[in-house]
Amino acid sequence: MKKFKLISGLLVMFLAFFILTGYTNNTQKNSNTIKVTYTLKQGKKVVATKKTTLKKNDKVITGLKKNWKVKEVKGFITSIDGMKENQKKGIYWTYTINGEKVNKLANQQTLKNKDKVQFTLDKAE
C-alpha cells in the first residue's frame, strides 16, 4: 500500500510539473504575438473576414498583406485581392480599427491584441 501511495504521489507531482512548465512556456511564447481580425467590405457587403496572428507592434499593412494580395502607392492601399479603387468615381479603400476611423496610413498604424480592422471599398465621405 505504501508503494502505491508513493508511486501515485510521484505521478501527481510529475503531472503537475509538466502542466505548470508547459503553461509557462506557452505564455512566454505567446506574449510576443497578437490576434487580429480583418474584414473586407465592398460598400455595405462583407466580402471576407480572416483572423490572423501577428507579432506585437506589427502594422495594419502586415496582416493585410499576410492574408490578401495588396497593392499600395506611398502607403495608400489601391487594391486588395483585385478589388481596385476608382479615383474617377471617388471610390477608395479606407479602414477603421475597432469601429474608429484612423488618421494614419496602414503602413504606419500599430496594432494591439484583439483589434478588429475593417477595410471598406466605397465612395469617400
Image (cartoon, rainbow, N blue to C red):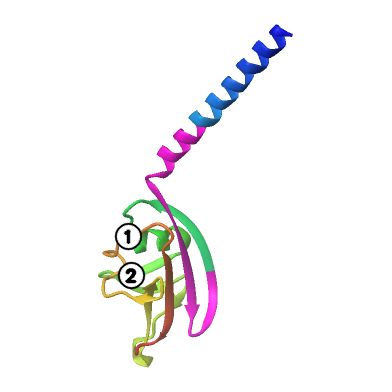
Q: Is residue 36 magenta?
A: yes
Residue 36 higher or lower than 125, as above or below = above
Residue 76 in magenta stretch: no
Q: Nearer the viewer, mark 1 or mark 2?
A: 1
Q: Residue type at mark 1?
A: Lys
Q: Is residue 121 above or below residue 8?
A: below
Residue 17: x and y, percent?
53, 24
Q: Position of residue 93 (x, y in %)?
A: 38, 78
Q: Residue furthest bottom?
A: 89
Q: Residue at x 49, y 81 (%)?
A: 42
User: Which residue bears the numbered disc 2?
Assistant: 72
Residue 82 place in picture, x, y as percent: 47, 73
Q: Position of residue 78 (x, y in %)?
A: 36, 75
Disc number for residue 59: 1
Asked whether 69 or 49 is in front, the reply is 49
Distance from Cα at disc 1 to Cα at disc 2: 14 Å
Residue 123 in the figure: left or right of residue 109: right
Measured along the vertical axis of the image, is residue 44 above or below residue 77?
Answer: below
Is disc 2 placed on a helix, strand or loop?
Answer: strand
Q: Residue furthest right?
A: 1
Quadrant of residue 87 in the image?
bottom left
Name the residue: 50% across, 35% down: 23
- SS class of the residue under badge 1? loop
- What residue span does the magenta drawing correspond to? 22-48
Q: Amino acid at mark 2?
A: Glu
